[in-house]
Structures are given as structure tokens and as C-alpha cells.
Image (cartoon, rainbow, N blue to C red):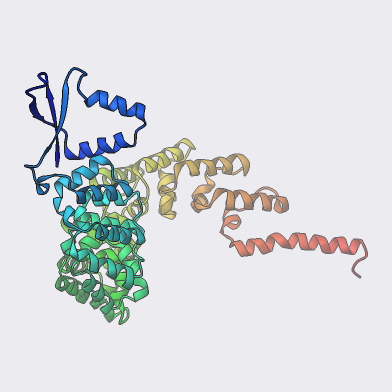
Amino acid sequence: MVAVLVMSRNPFSPTIVQSTLSALALHLSIIKFTSARPIEQKSILALVGPKPSKLVLIQCHSTITASNSPFTDMGIMLFSVFQEIGIDEKGAETLLENHPGLRFIPVESIRTRIRAFQLLGINSLVLPRLITKRPDILNSVEIDSFMCFIRDDLEGNIEPAQLERLLSTTEPRLLLGFEGKVRLLLHHGIPRDMLALVLNKVNISKALCLKSSEEIERTMTFLSRFAEWRCENATAIVLRKLPFILAYTAEHVKDHIEFLGSFAGLSDEEIFRIVLVYPNLFSASKIRKLHPRIDFLKQCGLTSNDIFRFLIKAPLFLSLSFEGNLAYKLVFLMKIGYQNRTKELAMAMGAVTRTSCKNMQEVIGLFLNYGLTCEDILAMSKKHPQVLQYNHESLEEKMDYLIEDMGCEVGELLAFPAFLGYKFDGRIKHRYEEKKKILGEGMSLNKLLSESAARFSIKKKKPLKNSVKLLDKVNGGED
């Protein structure tokens, strides 16, 4: 039923004018009016009512059927449901206009599905956004079996954020084979108690929903090659540690592994150990990153065994940008005296992959400001490559303490550059102050810091124990 506002200047021959108000807006204004106080009702009438000299006739128009109305009784009830979960008026109206099929679903069914989402941890902050983005999750038949599997078989252990991400980015029809693909992982050795952990780490949509069961099976079969040296359950080990690998095709994984085997001369075992340390290896482009970086290491004289040890310690070298990172570091290293295409240069490059170009520049500048030469810095970094990757602010604090409090010369760092790698408060300052009470000035940096914590603790207690015994003798407590 559509309300029509009829107004006329001549009370005997009124003209009919159809209201331009939408049915939803009219419904809301009626609710607002009926809940308003008498004074407020008068103000509302003043806005929409006629002047006293005019006649108002409310005419019921029966020529427009309910099926053509944009806001039926079912729509009104759905509007109420949407408001309950935090979708505002405009959002609710847009949902019903763009997805009229929602009006034909029993309201109780929609309530039940919303409660199912809430029980799986999708809270009131996330749910409105999810439904607004993917309203089809309210009426898709594929959702029911998916939700039951998450709740019953996976015991609701999929993290809400992961579930929301999956539902908001994946068409419901692609969830249809989800259960079978997960069971395929179980078949290949993933323990049931580890299944949720794997699924929470991987992009489920990319790894499972967008891939066929056959493609997943090929990836699993290819990974089983590691069983030859690791153990019979190698595939499960890979998936537990590297669940992201499911997102790549078997061909992609195979291509990267075969390249490292043929060009770098690495064995399956060595490749597997590198991947365990740095799973993002498969994200690096073989042509743009892997090939030129492995080639650089080979030009520096590294053997296959050297390359393996290098990548275990500095796997980030394979992914860093050359123009924005590695090129600058190469320039810094060669300025302090490293020679091109040498093993020393390669080892130094591996050490500085973990620091930024800016910090590396600050470190070199700090050493120069304290009186060290480029030759000194070169000698220190060859002896202790990590020295160039330490935080420059931390280094400055340690060097100040070394010179001003410990009374040492900066040149002593050349003999023991590892000094700069120890924690300041927990190791350097603490040990120096403890030893100073016993030995006084002039102690060896190497002996002071290299000693294990347990051995240092024992030695620290001995003087105190001997002093107690001496005091007992003086007091006659011991014959």
C-alpha cells in the first residue's frame, strides 16, 4: 500500500500528487512519529502537513502491488535484523535494494546463520562489514556444510580473523570442496591436532579454495621426495613448517628446487634446510633474483658447500632489492677496502643483509669518528663480520663506556671486535663492575666477556666464600 498525499487549493476539486518519499523512508518517519512526544509530533506535522487553508486527503493507492514494493513486510523484519548486528539504515536499505533475494529467505534462517558466525568468533565489529561485503553468505547453500565442518571437525579452531578473511574474499561456491581438500592434507600426514595451526598460517583461499584437489595432490606428491633423507613423514613436516607452500603450484615449487639443485649445486637435503630457515625463498623470482644472486656468489669463488652455508646464515640475500639495498652496501664495503669478486666480499655481504643501508653507513661513520681507519674497520669486519650490522646507537654507548669508564683504547677493538656484540647492561657493564671490585683496572676484554655465565657466576662467588672462611678463623669459629 502506498500513501499518496493529496493537496488542493480548491476544496471541491482536489488534484492528486504522488509522494516522492521512498517506502523505507516513509516507514522510518512513521516509526519516528509514533515514538515521539506530542510536541515533537506537532513539529513533524508542521514539516509535512498542509497549511491551515488547504485540504489534505490521504488516499490509499491499490494499483501498486506488494510485489513491486521495495520494502515489504519481510524487508521490514530483515531491516530490524540488520540493525541488531550493527548495520545502519543506509546500509540496510542498500543491501535489500541490491540483493532483493534476501527478502525471500525466512528471517529465522538468517538469524540462525548470523548466530553461527558469532559462535565461531566473528564479533559485532567484523560481522556488519562481512555481510555488507558478502551478503550472499546469508543465503548460499554451500555455507552450511562449510560452517558445520569448521565447527564440528575443526572444533572451531580457525581464528576469527582468518575465517573473516576467507569469507570476505572467496565466493561461496568455491567453499564446496573445502572439506575434501582438508582431508587430503590429513591423508598426507598432517596430524589432526596440527591441522588448525596449518590452516591459520596459510592463505586458505589461495592454497585450497582456488586450487583443485588434483593440483594439491601433485604438490603433496612432489614434496614427498624429501622423505628419501629426512623421514617417511617429510611431507607433513614441510606442511607444518611451511604451510604457505600450498599456495604455490607444484610446477612453481619444482622449478625453484630444480634451479637451486642444478645452478647452485645444492642437494635436496640442503635445499630443504634452507627452505626451513627461509620459506619465502619460493616467493623470490627465479629470473630477477635467484639467478643473479647465486651467480654473484659463484663469481666470488663460493663452492656449492659455501653457498649452502651462506644461504643458511643470510637467506634474505635472495630477496632484497639490488637497486634499493644491495648495490649501496656493495659500495660501502668496497670503500672500506673489500676487493671485488672475493669470498671476503661475499661473506661481508651476507653479514650486512640484516641491517639497513642507513644503519650501515652510520656504523662506518661512527668508527671513523672514534679514530679508526678504513683499514681498521676492514680488519674488524673480516675478523667479526657481524660488526657492521649492529645498531649504531648501541655501538656508540658501548664505545663510550669502553673508553671513558673502562679506560681502554679504541684500538683494543681490533683484537676483540666481538666486544661490540655483547649486551651492554647485562654483560659488559655488569661483569666489569663485578670484576673491578676484585681485580681492579686493566683486565682482558676477551677473558671478561667470553667466559660463560655459569663459570663467571662461580668465580664471582669464590672470593666471597674465602672471605667468610677467613673471618671465621679470626673469630675462632674454625681450628
* Residue 298 visible to the viewer: no
Which residue is at 89% across, 64% downward? 473
In the rendered structure, the answer to whether residue 345 lies left or right of residue 171 reads right
Q: Position of residue 285 (x, y in %)?
A: 19, 56
Residue 442, placed above or below residue 43: below
Q: Looking at the figure, which quarter contains the N terminus?
A: top left
* Figure quadrant of residue 448: bottom right
Image spot of residue 24 (x, y percent) = 20, 40
Extreme residue toward the right, this view: 476
Residue 7 or residue 469, whichever sits in front: 7
Position in image of residue 224 (x %, y %)? 24, 77
Residue found at x 56% / y 59%: 450
**Viewer-proximal residue among 400 and 288:** 288
Q: Is residue 436 left or right of residue 269?
A: right
Residue located farthest toward the front when viewing the structure as drawn: 12
Residues 158 and 48: in front is 48
Q: Is residue 218 visible?
A: yes
Task: Tell me if residue 419 comes above or below residue 403 in the rendering.
Answer: below
Residue 108, above or below 337: below
Task: From the top left corner, tell me how far across and down residue 106 is, in percent.
Answer: 22, 58
